[in-house]
Amino acid sequence: MLDRVVVVGAGVVGLSIARVLSALEGLEVVVVEKEADVGWGASKANTGIIHSGYDDDPVKYPNRARLAVKGNRLWTTWAEQLSIPVDWCGSLVLARSSEDRRVLRELLARGIRNGVPALRILDGEEVRALEPMVSEDVVEALWSPTAGVLSPYEATVALAENCVENGVKILTETLVKGVRVKDGSVEGVETSRGFIGARWVVNAAGLYADEIARMAGVSDYTITPRRGEYLVFDKDAGPKPSRILFPTPTPVSKGVVVETTVAGNLMIGPNAVDLPRDAKEETYTTKEGLAYVWREASKLVKKLPGKREVIRVFSGLRPQPSGGDFIVRVLEEPEGFVEAAGMRSPGLAAAPAVALEILRLMRLNGLDHGFKKRWKAERRAGLRIMGLGWDMLEKTVSRNPSYGRVVCWCEGVTEGEVVDAIRRGAKTIDGVKFRTRAGMGRCQGAFCRLRIAAILARELGKPIWSITVKGTGSELGVGDVKSLLEGEDVAD
């Protein structure tokens, strides 16, 4: 039988699994993704928080509780190996009432049971000494120093690049249409690019994991989308917290968070709105949802910046499994079908631990490959001009003048950085954006979008009108406008 594993889904969980499997000698790893780039599902639009693991009940949700704590520890190594910027700033769960204080003690006991280190309850004076912008209404807080923040899309790109360095094939714009099963064992996947044979199929398809499972004859759970809406402020807008600020959680969610991203933007959100199962593409924002986020965030801090300082609103969909817990398993039937499904929060935090757990379970079920002697654990990040000192900047620009030509003034991104992103795999305007931050600043791409499209066209050898924002169907134009000037029949 062919010694290949197909991972369905190029999100942070799927690529973490692919990274771990890429360390095995003689095993071919192929990742298939329906979007035009990696990390464009649930991995793209979330808080980016590496939760410490105090929130999840180990009785109700044992996988979430165990894997979040382990994943948090693993990210300290993975982030360093993969050159992923991370701020280990810690988090505060804020109490404003006697009921909130009771919940804090439940969280503290749960966190200790889960093995979360250094948890402590602070009084109001201690809280404001640690985080001055906290509301005067706050009377206590649970302090968790091991929580952190990273950029989820940068982390996903870093994982993808490391996977490719280790021989993984990543097929984007490849839709899985079926899972072929014969005599109780998987044989591979039917895709929009044809059949891919495999001994193992790993279902890490996020919002669509239940649909992939049904293709394999597995129907014991469903995935519904839970929408969360966010507001992002200009980098110059303040005040900004130095810690992650949570309210006390509810049975539904961890609540609206106030945080500073690793890029330096104040961000608030999300709310939690459960949508019908068939609403897995409904990523629009709502007036009511954004108003709720603003209202709840305002309760945590003394003051938010003015609404005119908001430069972006967006929403993300989290995959909510019917049972609540992560689904991490290797099935006996069909043999070779593996699942990492239902990765709602804290899925980002748990991702490295989920990957190692999948490897362990696959080994128990017949995966017998040894480890490579020359597996590459480290990945070199792309050059960021804004982070260079003056002397290094001068040397870099003298060697390659394209690093001196600014394309995105808001984020200080140069032509050289855009070209580097394209050579690392970006094929769309959003692909460049998520690798360089070009287009994420105050003007949201009004200045740089066309310039980036021109560079993409030049580097990819395509006409500029065929360049897309986010893949097929989002082209900048419908054809060469010169055909109109030359009197050609547009209908031909």
Image (cartoon, rainbow, N blue to C red):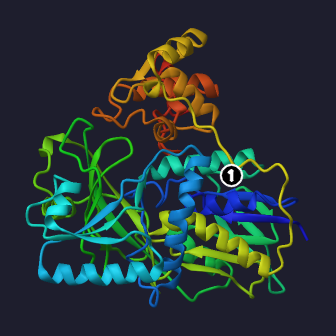
Judge by depth and name the residue closer to the eye, 94 or 413. 94
Judge by depth and name the residue closer to the eye, 86 or 291. 86
The single residue placed furthest to the right in the displayed view is 1
* In this rendering, position of residue 260 left or right of residue 157: left
Report the quarter where the C terminus lies.
top right
Residue that badge 1 annotates: 171
Q: Position of residue 343 (x, y in %)?
A: 50, 71
Report the quarter where the N terminus lies.
bottom right
Q: Is residue 363 visible?
A: yes
Decide: is 239 above or below 321.
above
As helix, strand or loop, the secondary structure at mark 1 comes to: strand
Total number of numbered discs in the rendering: 1
Q: Position of residue 410 (x, y in %)?
A: 33, 28
Q: Position of residue 319 (x, y in %)?
A: 45, 71
Residue at 41 percent of width and 80 percent of height: 112
* In this rendering, position of residue 488 left or right of residue 309: right
Judge by depth and name the residue closer to the eye, 62 or 280. 62
Decide: is 51 above or below 441.
below
Judge by depth and name the residue closer to the eye, 249 or 486. 249
Residue at 84 percent of width and 86 percent of height: 183
* Mark 1 crowd level (few <14, some 14–19, many ≥20, 10 Å Cα): many
Residue type, numbered disc 1: Leu
* In this rendering, position of residue 212 left or right of residue 406: right
Decide: is 117 above or below 239.
below
Q: Is residue 175 visible?
A: no
Residue at 67 percent of width and 45 percent of height: 378
Q: Position of residue 187 (x, y in %)?
A: 81, 73
